[in-house]
Image (cartoon, grey):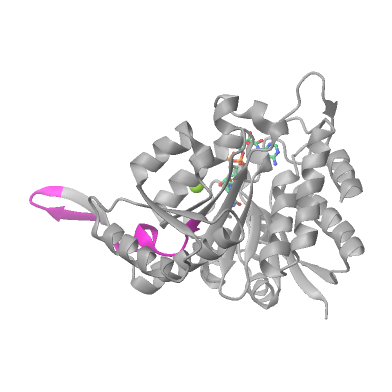
Amino acid sequence: MAKKIVVIPGDGIGKEITDSAVEVLKKADAKFGLGLSYDYYDAGGTAYDKFGTPLPQETIDAAKASDGVLFGAVGGDKWDNVEPTLRPEKAILGLRKHLGLYANLRPVKVSDTLVEYSPLKQEVVKGVDLVIVRELIGGIYFGDRCESEQKDGHERAWDLENYSVPEVERIAKLAFETAKLRRGKVTSVDKSNVLATSRLWRRTVAEVSKGYPDVELDNLYVDNCAMQLALRPTQFDVICTGNLFGDILSDEAAVLGGSIGMMPSASIGECTSLFEPIHGSAPDIAGQGIANPIGTILSAAMLLRYSLHEEAAAKAIEDACDKALADGYRTPDLWKEGFKKANTDLMTEVIVERV
Ligand code: NAI
Ligand code: MG
């Protein structure tokens, strides 16, 4: 039976980069016999223009019924004045909610060819290969909040951080499963010297770890973790953390590799999972055919790995991206004297050749 992939290009460079990733998937399919099919749906500003909503019901239904969603990016200046509940970015938040995407995985791998793009010293980032596993639908982003109230004669606002044991168990299991396939180390990050939620987090992760005797568990406070990511990032294999800390640490970790255009992500759901580059719709370069497609291509590889369990095909795509870079091809975001200039189409072509 065909494996149904729902492709949601979205806005800005979204179409260019998802087209590119689908070309690469088609080559992997031809080589590994994956039996993939592709259905295209709208979301974001493009959907708002057509249907008056950034996330049409048919997009939600199709995503739910699929074997995996490949998402480009949404947003752009054109929709700056749209009312807040109908903004393009609501599409991705809505999909997280409707698909129950409880975990966000962001791998950061600095291959030898990319070491020179890092803002950090080469000896610090050489060999970095880590994954941040961030809880995505709980914690302070989804707790009760108060925009404004009067107390003791002053205006105040508040947001409630809260986690339940099952929420922490679910994300911790995913982190340990991920570590099992890698170097066997989980670093759980919290602020348990201050926060009650963090103490529950730490207890629960320790409990889950008993089921994984072969995986080493380390605990770090979030402030120390932020520092360690800049000082000695090679110490990390899998970092497991809550929604707020994960949001901040994953952006910090993303700069280790130097280019936002290279970074993939996976959002894992109970049934369907969603895969997208970490960058946005890059309105400043949209339509010029120069976007770096690698973050989206690597996201497609994660789709093969996590949703379809096609490890060999996923690895072949990742190796093809490494090979294209090692052979000197660079999109403008990475281009320097001495390298071969590639637009999106050429970059796609050289990666397809190497799969
Ligand atoms: P952005 O990630 O779109 O762009 C930041 C900078 O990186 C720009 O200079 C852009 O040209 C460059 N860039 C990004 N991706 C690139 C690629 N593949 N190749 C080459 N260069 C690339 O972030 P920005 O400008 O803050 O946001 C633009 C729009 O995207 C906004 O509407 C924002 O809300 C939306 N956004 C959407 C996300 C999503 O759909 N998941 C995530 C982040 C932002
Ligand atoms: Mg962020």
* Quarter holding residue 331: top right
| Left or right of 312 on screen, residue 90 | left
Q: What percent of the width, then of the height, locates residue 39? A: 79, 69
At x 49% / y 60%, what residue is drawn?
A: 215
At x 87% / y 64%, what residue is drawn?
A: 32
Which one is in front, 207 or 91? 207
Q: What percent of the width, then of the height, locates residue 204? A: 35, 67
Magenta region: which residues? 133-154
At x 85% / y 72%, what residue is drawn?
A: 35
Instruction: Say if residue 9 shows up in the picture.
Output: no
Instruction: Say if residue 55 shows up in the picture.
Output: yes
Q: What percent of the width, then of the height, locates residue 285? A: 72, 36
User: Disc count in the image?
Assistant: 0
* Quarter holding residue 299: bottom right
Q: What percent of the width, then of the height, locates residue 320? A: 82, 46
Residue farthest top in this picture: 337
Residue farthest bottom in this picture: 1
* Residue 307 in the image: above or below residue 227: below
Assign the N terminus to one quadrant of the image: bottom right
Residue farthest front in this picture: 214
* Quarter holding residue 209: bottom left
Residue 249 on the magenta span: no
| Left or right of 58 on screen, residue 240 | left
| Left or right of 25 on screen, residue 283 | left
At x 35% / y 71%, what residue is drawn?
A: 165
Which one is in front, 132 or 6? 132
* Residue 276 in the image: above or below residue 126: below
Which one is in front, 22 or 194? 194
Residue farthest left in this picture: 152
